[in-house]
Image (tube, grey):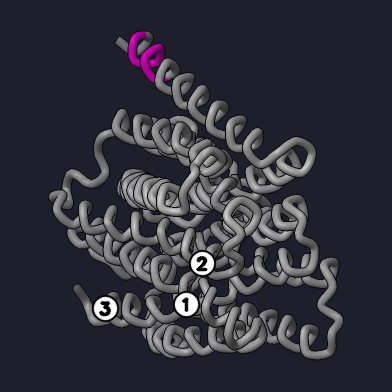
């Protein structure tokens, strides 16, 4: 592993830790001000829906620019927006409408960050180490996912939202330094052609749709994003509404999901790197099991059962994320990495915005249990449909 990759992975760990502090602080601010499942979904959607619009644009730009410099600019923008949340809270003008706008601005930056980050990982990694770098990058995310939310819950409860946000900002500083160093010697991008952005995106869409090793993983991500990750965005409401455990309980649920994700990463480290991107049927089975598990949050009679379910959906989501990323990026030509990974971002992250909004609305209009049953049933059904689609496609091909 090169020095650049190792430095990035180390600094990114602290940045991701800070991201979890900031994310949970914003979600808790929304719940504390409204006690509404719908508004919780709105805040989640405000952070995630921009992915649908801005990720393809950022992916196109990533194929044309030096990505380390682009990531540095995005991180600075995220820091400025987070500081604005602290300021509005200090002067007591952080109403739900203002917070929604700020969450949306963070969503725009995050939408740009994810495909550019994926393109950079591929660009600074050699072919033989790429799969392992993705696994280690996932491990950083999942370890912070395990520790960050629980720490954020305690920080919010004992030190307040403002201090939690500021502490999250501190975690961004090491990665800013590493990105500045990488930007100083980064090579020119592989795709510097002057054609219009729309034409470049159309080419990438055609590549993704006609390449089964890209198309099918993206469909699986869409199901998981809407029907599983959409439910995970409601963890604060589930923790407080069902179990009366407040911010600490919300952090514990998210940390349980993080624990499952860490276990998934450790399992993937045992798999030979050349086999990590294989096994599509296994992915379908895993996403189906995740959807079946979703209603358990609504019928669990114990907090332990809820945390165990969160751990399972965290494990399945981590495996899906790593395996689909390796499948897609190993197949995608270098000049298309940013654009194709923007589709991965849309369906793994942006789809959760749609899920959170719809599930939150159903929960407010009926009950949380009804929304969980609907999410689990629809997700399972669509997984079966994709499996049948694959069988029919193979039969036609043969």
Q: Is residue 350 above or below residue 394?
A: below
Image side of residue 73 versus residue 263, left or right: right
Q: Quadrant of residue 102?
A: bottom right
Q: Are the two marked residues, 1 and 2, in contact with CB atoms closer than 8 angstroms?
A: yes
Q: Label 3, secondary structure: give it.
A: helix
Query: Disc 1 or 2, which lies upstream in sequence?
Result: 1
Q: Which residues are magenta?
A: 390-395
Disc on res. 6: 3
Image side of residue 162 versus residue 221, left or right: right
Q: Can residue 391 be found in the magenta stretch?
A: yes
Q: Quadrant of residue 378?
A: top right
Overall secondary structure of the magenta section: helix
Q: Label 1, secondary structure: give it.
A: helix
Task: Identify residue for label 1.
Answer: 151
> Residue at image x 26%, y 44%?
277
Residue 161 position within the rendered picture, expressed as x and y whole percent measured from the top left: 65, 81
In front of the other: label 1 or label 3?
Answer: 1
Disc on res. 251: 2
> Residue at image x 26%, y 60%?
130
Residue 244 position within the rendered picture, expressed as x and y whole percent measured from the top left: 61, 59
Label 1 Cα crowd, 10 Å radius (few <14 / some 14-19 / many 20+): many
Query: Disc 1 or 3, which lies upstream in sequence?
Result: 3
Q: Distance between the Cα atoms at labels 3 and 2?
A: 29 Å
């Amino acid at each position: 592993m090169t020095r650049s990759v190792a430095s990035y992975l180390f600094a990114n760990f602290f940045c991701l830790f800070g991201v979890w502090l900031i994310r949970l602080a914003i979600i808790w601010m929304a719940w504390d001000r409204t006690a509404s499942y719908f508004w919780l979904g709105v805040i989640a959607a405000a952070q995630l829906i921009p992915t649908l619009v801005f990720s393809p644009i950022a992916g196109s730009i990533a194929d044309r620019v030096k990505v380390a410099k682009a990531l540095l600019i995005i991180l600075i923008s995220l820091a400025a927006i987070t500081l604005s949340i602290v300021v509005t809270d200090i002067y007591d003008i952080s109403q739900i409408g203002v917070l929604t706008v700020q969450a949306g601005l963070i969503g725009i930056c995050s939408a740009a960050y994810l495909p550019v980050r994926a393109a950079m990982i591929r660009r600074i990694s050699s072919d033989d180490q790429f799969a392992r770098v993705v696994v280690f990058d996932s491990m950083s995310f999942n370890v912070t996912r395990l520790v960050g939310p629980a720490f954020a819950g305690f920080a919010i409860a004992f030190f307040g939202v403002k201090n939690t946000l500021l502490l999250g900002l501190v975690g961004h500083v090491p990665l800013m330094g590493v990105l500045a160093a990488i930007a100083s010697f980064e090579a020119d991008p592989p795709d510097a052609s002057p054609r219009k952005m729309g034409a470049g995106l159309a080419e990438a869409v055609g590549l993704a749709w006609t390449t089964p090793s890209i198309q099918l993983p993206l469909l699986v991500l869409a199901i998981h994003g809407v029907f599983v990750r959409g439910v995970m965005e409601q963890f604060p409401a589930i923790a407080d509404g069902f179990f009366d455990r407040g911010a600490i309980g919300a952090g514990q649920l998210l940390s349980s999901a993080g624990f499952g994700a860490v276990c998934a990463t450790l399992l993937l480290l045992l798999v030979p790197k050349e086999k990590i991107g294989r096994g599509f049927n296994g992915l379908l089975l895993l996403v189906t099991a995740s959807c079946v598990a979703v209603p358990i949050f609504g019928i669990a009679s114990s907090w332990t059962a809820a945390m165990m379910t969160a751990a399972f959906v965290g494990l399945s989501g981590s495996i899906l994320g790593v395996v689909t990323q390796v499948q897609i990026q190993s197949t995608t030509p270098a000049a298309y990495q940013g654009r194709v990974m923007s589709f991965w971002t849309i369906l793994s992250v942006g789809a959760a915005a749609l899920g959170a909004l719809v599930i939150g609305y159903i929960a407010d209009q009926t009950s949380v249990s009804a929304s969980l049953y609907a999410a689990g049933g629809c997700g399972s059904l669509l997984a079966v449909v994709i499996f049948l689609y694959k069988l029919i496609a193979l039969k036609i091909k043969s």
